[in-house]
DNA sequence: CGTTAGCACTCATTGTCGTCGAGTGCTAAT
DNA sequence: ATTAGCACTCGACGACAATGAGTGCTAACG
């Protein structure tokens, strides 16, 4: 579809624009060592590329900037990805050399590393806990009418919730109920817990019906509130250093999005496995229509272990980011898959 | 020190400036119904007030704006505080009508209410847990070499941490150690836990010395990591709507501060009990030298239950904020003191 | 004597205008 | 096919005048 020369010029323009954030003129392309043509020739090609929709002109007599389509072509066919800076690599390696035993800690640190290395905003989504199973369930009385319910999964994740205890429920009742639940439910995947609780364990708890409801609610809560804690952001203020966010209003809509975990979760659902690149308006959410989102979902033997992503301006360094995500996601997969057995 | 008329004019100027965010001229003050003087008279008084240091002039031929000293006088002597909007009050009441049994949930919601009602940034610091005592300690094995340690306090707060178990430690050893710890340490204030662990329980755990170290570390961690979770921010992006934050750089330094819990904790330490107002450069941290911080620390019978604060531009609505904080802090104190028995 | 009308003065803001220069598109020469 | 040359476009920038909000000062007033 494009001639070799057009591809070369498109590549040069986008590279330049990524570095300078300013419209690229024919002269500056011509002056680069790697393109041996005069400005006039470049101009002709640039006009063609604009006709084809790969470039845009902010106004006559300005240089060209890449269009969404241009970025898309660049990402799909031109960018050299997979080359990671030696120094960045060693930063990542030393990070993974630290052994951490808190899953959340790992995720959080990974997010930090990413945002530091890229100067963009990183979003890391940890493993879905409904692939986990119940390891331990406990109810610890705090006062006469409240107790703390604690749910531990096989991956070491702990969820807790304070609940009120009905006045007509005795200590022995509770103890017995918890015992029953533990013996019957340990090892059950969280996702199947609810149905199992109703169908099989229900009748055994026959005479504790109200209790059953209570405990069910607790377990349910542990599952749902879980989503919130799976996601970590880092470098949210890095965006402010990008010239495209000089405008405070744009900043606000973006930062407001960052505070809305559910909206972010929605953006992160329906992503391809492996590396995925969403450029500008390809993104579902309006707040990031002038951003690009690059994600890497990693899974082992079909089981998803999470997603790491970088959000930056459309004018972001795709090559570098994709390379980093590839390295980091495979390392994360290795680390987490070991941990999740 | 100031004549009645000067006080009146100072008050009018600050009120105007708080509303408009623009330098206030003599004419606009004169036109207000409550000041019956001509612009010329006002001008004379304004010049005096400037000489006294209560007002500043951005440049000749501009109106006046309050100085730090002016705000200070306004807060100390002029502002009518304690008057809370009827509608705001009902919002707060309905909020406290909801019964929530998670302390963190209460704190978080209170922060949200505050930022919504004021359009500033709210910071809420929950009760210090070192006034709590140990309720339950447990070690749940997850795999052959890891376990989850769980600490529950008498207030229902749960802290958990995943730890590695030395290979040479048997299941029975662990169980026994946990048993000993539980029987000896329940009810002990967290702050005294460490010393007690060493002095009294240490020899009883004589033959499990290495274990002792491990468990100590866990409890220690639970105490220290605690600080991080006591603080909640809300409405961090509200600042962006203030005209004084049109500049992206200022926004960045402020938002970066918000991400640094320890720095915030330092700002929140050394605050007066009751209502405290820190105006502009009275604040220790440079990032908020053009902000005012109003805080309300609430305690019951000498025991501190936390602090709620509002951070806004120096040009903030002191009267409204102080009123809201008074209401909310007393409500919070009542709610939490009940909960903490 | 306190208050105020009047007036000259200051200075940020706004709009206009010409210059500058980076960049383009087109044409003709190579 | 490539490129030198050239006229053209248009945003950025600085100079400049007009505007107007606001001041300080002086003199008149009740």
Image (tube, coloured by chain):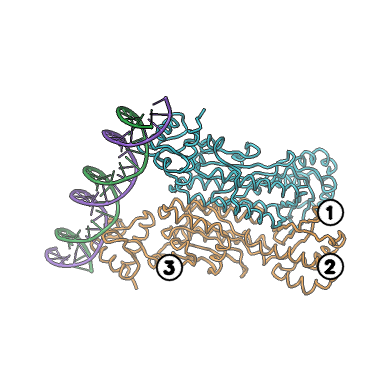
Chain colours: A orange, B cyan, C purple, D green
**Residue pointed to by mark 2:** A208
Q: In which quarter of the image is residue B91?
A: bottom right
Q: In which quarter of the image is residue B99?
A: bottom right
SS at mark 3? helix
Q: How far apart are marks 3 and 2 (CA)?
A: 60 Å
| Chain to which mark 1 belongs | B
Question: Label 2's element?
Answer: helix
Does B311 appear above or below A168? above
Left or right: C18 as drawn, with respect to B326: left
Q: Which label was assigned to residue A76?
A: 3
Residue occupied by mark 1? B172
User: Residue at horizontal 85%, vertical 42%?
Assistant: B204
Mark in the foreground, 2 or 1 = 2
Q: Badge 2, how many Cα within 10 Å: few under 14, some, many 20+? A: some
Q: How crowded is mark 3: few (under 14 residues within 10 Å), some or many (20 or more)?
A: few
Taking A68 as reference, is A142 above or below it? above
Q: Are callouts 3 and 2 both on one chain?
A: yes
- Mark 1: which secondary structure? helix
Q: Position of residue B90 (x, y in %)?
A: 63, 55
Residue drawn at (86%, 69%) of the image: A207
Q: Which residue is drawn at 45% across and 34% down?
A: B55
User: Gap between marks 2 and 1, in whole Å?
Assistant: 33 Å
Residue B143 location (% of width, % of height): 74, 59
| Closer to the camera in the image, B313 or A148 | B313
Label annotation for residue A266: none
Residue A29: horizontal and vertical position, in percent?
A: 30, 58
B136 sits left or right of A14 in the view: right
Q: Is residue A224 left or right of residue A208?
A: left
């Amino acid at each position: 579809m494009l001639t070799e020369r057009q591809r070369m010029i498109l590549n040069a323009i986008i590279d330049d624009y990524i570095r300078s954030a300013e419209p690229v003129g024919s002269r500056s392309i011509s002056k680069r060592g790697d393109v041996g043509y005069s400005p006039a020739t470049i101009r002709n090609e640039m006009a063609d590329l604009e006709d084809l929709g790969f470039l845009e002109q902010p106004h006559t007599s300005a240089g060209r900037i890449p269009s969404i389509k241009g970025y898309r072509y660049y990402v799909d066919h031109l960018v050299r990805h997979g080359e990671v800076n030696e120094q960045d690599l060693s930063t990542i390696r030393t990070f993974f050399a630290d052994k951490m035993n808190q899953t959340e800690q790992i995720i959080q640190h990974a997010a930090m590393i990413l945002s530091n290395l890229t100067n963009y905003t990183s979003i890391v989504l940890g493993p879905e806990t409904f692939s986990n199973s119940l390891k331990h369930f406990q109810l610890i009385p705090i006062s006469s009418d409240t107790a703390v319910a604690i749910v531990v999964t096989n991956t070491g994740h702990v969820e807790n919730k304070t609940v009120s205890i009905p006045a007509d429920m005795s200590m022995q009742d509770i103890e017995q109920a918890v015992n029953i639940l533990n013996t019957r439910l340990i090892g059950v995947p969280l996702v199947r817990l609810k149905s199992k609780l109703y169908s099989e364990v229900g009748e055994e708890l026959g005479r504790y019906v109200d209790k059953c409801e209570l405990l069910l609610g607790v377990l349910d809560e542990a599952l749902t509130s879980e989503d919130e804690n799976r996601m970590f952001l880092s470098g949210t203020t890095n965006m402010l250093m990008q010239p495209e966010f000089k405008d405070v209003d744009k900043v606000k809509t973006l930062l407001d999005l960052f505070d809305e975990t559910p909206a972010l979760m929605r953006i992160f659902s329906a992503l391809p496995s492996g590396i995925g690149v969403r450029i500008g308006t390809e993104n579902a959410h309006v707040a990031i229509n002038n951003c690009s989102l690059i994600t890497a979902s990693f899974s082992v033997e079909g089981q998803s272990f999470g997603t790491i992503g970088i959000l930056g301006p459309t004018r972001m360094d795709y090559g570098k980011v994709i390379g980093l995500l590839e390295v980091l996601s495979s390392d994360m997969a290795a680390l987490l898959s070991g941990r999740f057995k």
